Amino acid sequence: MIEHIGNRYIENRPVYSANAFQEEHKKKDRYHKTFLDHLKVCCSCSTQKAKGIALSLLPIASWLPAYRIKEWLLSDIVSGISTGLVCVLQGLAYALLVNIPPSYGLYAAFFPIITYFFLGTSRHIAVGPFPVLSIMVGATVMRLSSMDNSDAMDSNNSSMSSNSSLDDYRVMVAATVTVLSGIVQLLLGVLQVGFLVIYLSESLISGFTTAAAVHVLVSQLKFMLQLSVPSHTDPFSLFKILNSLFTQIEKTNIADLVTSLIILFILFVVKEINQRYRTKLPVPIPIELIMTVIATGVSYGFDFEGRFNVTVIGNMPSGFEPPITYDLETIQGTIGDSFSIAIVGFAVAFSVASVYSLKHDYAIDGNQELIALGVSNIFTGSFKGFAASTALSRSAIQESTGGKTQIAGILSAIIVLIFIQNLGFLLAPLQKSVLAALALGNLKGMLMQFTEIRRLWRKDKYDCLIWIVTFIFVTVLGLALGLAASVAFQLLTIVFRTQFPKCSTLASVGRSNIYKNKKDYSDIYEPEGVKIFRCPSPIYFANINFFKQKLIDAVGFSPLRILRKRNKALKKIRKLQKRGLLQVTPKGFICTADGLKDSDEELDNNQVEELNQPINTTDLPFQIDWNANLPLSIAVPRIDLHSLILDFSAVSFLDVSSMRGLKAILQAFIRIKVDVYIVGADDDFIEKLQRCEFFDDEVKDSIFFLTIHDAVLHILMKKDDSTSKFNYNQVPVETKF
């Protein structure tokens, strides 16, 4: 019964042990489904289930019939046109990151949108090239197409019979790794393992994308300066590229440098205006489109290519090219990179989609997103595009300009299609340095993620460390290897968190039933002779020794050492009593011997197991008070602890190894007459201990209680009422107090 008195309450209920509670409140029988039951449900067939599968595989069938033409169509048209123009420019710019001709970037901006329109579950993300993925694909392209790798080129002459140029080979490599990454994503989606993205934490993704932005920045410098820089894909490649840039900096094309710097400055200023006045502007200022038109007109009007020897896009073929022909050796060389590209592409797309799904209150399906991105990449790679995901800047434009559904996406694809078929020639005079500047202009958001370090340091030191280490690994080791090392380090931090938990000793705050770390409060109450120890992590093979050491530090002594000391002392007392040299009086022991010749070394030899056994004094005609004065020089450390409470409310599991270690230390406490109570353990936890024969004749004395306060009350009542009929070895507790 609970009585409310203002903002206080008085609770009147029995002191519950776990067994007492279960005897008073019986659990109802529940049927737990077996694997066979789940298999039957999975293999069963019905009209409703078939409809659900069809709608899940084709999400367009669920949202398109509910499309509000009058309310949404105009917004989707405006959004589609704005996003489509940005897609054209970003496709051309990100093709430079892949080290292929810019025209192929239009394919990467077109094909993914078509398939995602039918298969995707997000209504707002703009699918297409993403700088991080582009540079990952570009690293694979440069690794296989390096001029030093002449064997790879020779072995692929048959697949490039129509045109043996290096560009064609690079396009084939980019398309191949894109198709393979799509196959990986599709298989992961079919196998329903979209949950794998949870192993890429927000801190890791932030550190990874920031480091990737640094790689993008360095890779675009050669286009801004128009320098011939050899490609490097091995670890420390970033520093090798910088070294190549600085050693030939005097060859910089001033016209390209000045143009790109002017473009960058204007981009940053206008993007800042768009960000600051986003609530007042009807649509963001399309600065990329404006600067592209101006730069193309100026380059054409003043003949920059002839007068200043700048590098331009050149003529772009109109229309689409035939699908690629795959090469077995290229597939073997790219299959490893495809896994990292697939995971990163999905992680970025899913995280952006999650932001907009929460904002606009609709659900997205991670497994279906894997299928949609996988099919999109297979389709795109087959037609000589490169890996697609989504870019936050492009998706922000689609959403902020009023986009309601993927109708806006399909309209943006139509804009890209127009440029592929008819308007590509208009961009021929555009400098590649302008495309590089446009690519760098979209990196501001990722580079500003450096500010995350301060926020993470204040919130969680481990997350901050993950961010910093990920950034360093990816910057130094490269994207693929750095990502693998970062994921391994992140998982290692989980091991550290559980292997070295922040154990604490609890006490009552303000003599209430609220128990907190006693180091954090001054007004605390700790019952005499009682220790309350809390471990906030699973207990398993890697941290059981740490747990035992922390427990020993909390109580102030080693129970096993005390046990051995008492057994040694008992041996000496038996010898004295057997020789008639020891008498017991009401005031204590009287010893008539001058000394005992037995040495400690003699007692220790081959008797470790014997010293660890329970203390048995049944053969003695008297009882021994181990905290009293013992005869002669027999010294046993005194302990004031009589009850130990272990708070297991945050312990989610125990493995077999930890059970053995925990059982051993509990036995040691019980053998030196320290009662052990375990609180906060749920029923499944207790049942698991019982199935594993955790309790024997000694450890069964450890009583499970519902709360810390129940255990404390039980200890105090047991200590204060010696006339009660309470049987300590029997559960449930008699609740007459």
Image (cartoon, rainbow, N blue to C red):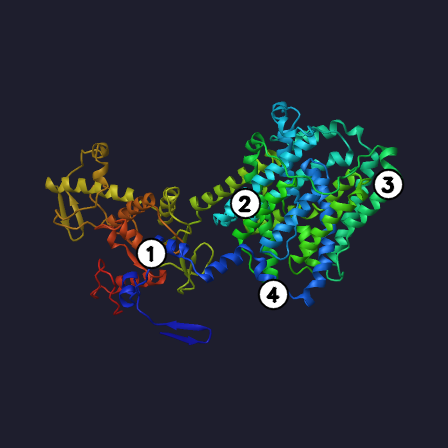
Q: Earlier in the sequence, mark 2 or mark 4?
A: 4
Q: Quadrant of residue 23?
A: bottom left
- What residue type is disc 2 on? Gln
Q: Nearer the viewer, mark 4 or mark 1?
A: 4
Mark positioned earlier in the residue sequence (4 or 1): 4
Give above or below for 299 relative to 723: above
Mark 4: few/some/many CA within 10 Å (<14, 14-19, 20+): few
In percent of width and height, residue 705 lies at 32, 60
Q: Is residue 76 visible?
A: yes
Dot 1, how many residues are within 10 Å of its Cα: few (below 14), some (14-19), or many (20+)? few
In the image: residue 168, left or right of residue 528: right
- Identify the element where label 2 is drawn: helix
* Callout 3 secondary element: helix
Q: Residues under labels 4 and 1: Cα distance?
A: 46 Å
Label 4 residue SS:
loop
**Along the line of sight, the residue nearer the viewer: 537 or 723:** 537
Mark 1 or 3: the one toward you:
3
Of badges 4 and 3, the one in the foreground is: 4
Residue 205, percent across and down?
58, 46
Question: Disc 2, disc 4: CB below 8 Å?
Answer: no
Q: CA distance from mark 2 to mark 4?
A: 29 Å
Mark 3, residue position: 300
Q: Identity of the amino acid at label 4?
A: Ala
Q: Residue 66 shows which numbered tag? A: 4
Q: Which residue is mark 2?
A: 185
Mark 4 or 3, nearer chain start: 4
Contact (Cβ within 8 Å) of mark 4 with mark 1: no
Disc 2 crowd rating (10 Å Cα; few below 14, some 14-19, many 20+) is many
**Label 3 crowd bin: few (<14), some (14–19), many (20+), radius 10 Å:** some
- Which residue type carries mark 3? Tyr
Residue at mark 1 to residue at mark 3: CA–CA distance: 76 Å
Q: Residue at image x 56%, y 31%?
A: 328
